[in-house]
Amino acid sequence: MNETSPPLDSAPKWIRLVARVWSAPVIVFALIMAGGYAWSWLTTGVADPYQVEGTTFVEALPPILLFISILGLALAWRWAKLGGGFSLIVTAAVVLVLVIQGPTTADFSRAMVPYLLSLVVLIPGILFLIYGIRSGG
């Protein structure tokens, strides 16, 4: 191998860098949201004072699972394969719950927002998993 060719492990480093740059604002945003809900719950006794009456657990499940998936992204900063795989599995569960919960054809533009949010979490999870597999760790 000559001296001008890049080392074999440079591609995984770039994959990890892109995954970290993408996931950092997602993690920070999720922590700010969780902190806001916790502060509201501690000061007012209600996590979300604007919650609609009669909201079922199934309707609240996708945001909860997305937060858990984002925790998987934070885990992937240390253990890429474990955190990326965890994030992928939980995000797949989010999409499954969304598909079961309601059709996307009723109001297409509004119904696609949860799927797009899932995609924002899914892509760095895939990148972390690829990095973990390619780096062998």
Image (spheres, grey):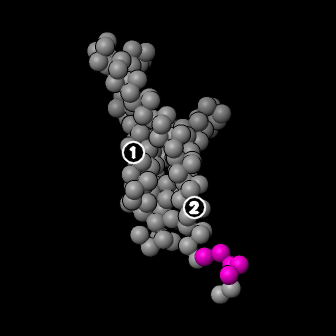
Kindly indicate the quadrant of the structure image that contains residue 85: bottom left
Residue tagged by mark 1?
Answer: 71
Q: Is residue 11 above or below residue 126?
A: below
Q: Is residue 81 above or below residue 9?
A: above
In the image, what residue type sits under mark 1?
A: Leu
Q: Which residues are magenta?
A: 3-7
Q: Residue at x 39, y 19 (%)?
A: 48
Quarter of the image where the N terminus is located = bottom right
Q: Please give the residue where the numbered disc 2 appears in the rendered image.
A: 15
Residue at image location 34% in from the left, 24% down from the top: 38
Residue situated furthest front in the rendering? 3
Please state the horizontal and vertical placement of residue 75, each as a whole percent of the image. 38, 51
- The one of 124 and 52 positioned closer to us in this rendering: 124
Q: CA distance from mark 2 to mark 1?
A: 19 Å
Mark 1 is surrounded, within 10 Å at the Cα level, by few (under 14), some (14 to 19) or many (20 or more) other residues, namely some
Disc assigned to residue 13:
none
- Determine the secondary structure under disc 2: helix
The part of the image, by quadrant, that contains residue 57 is top left
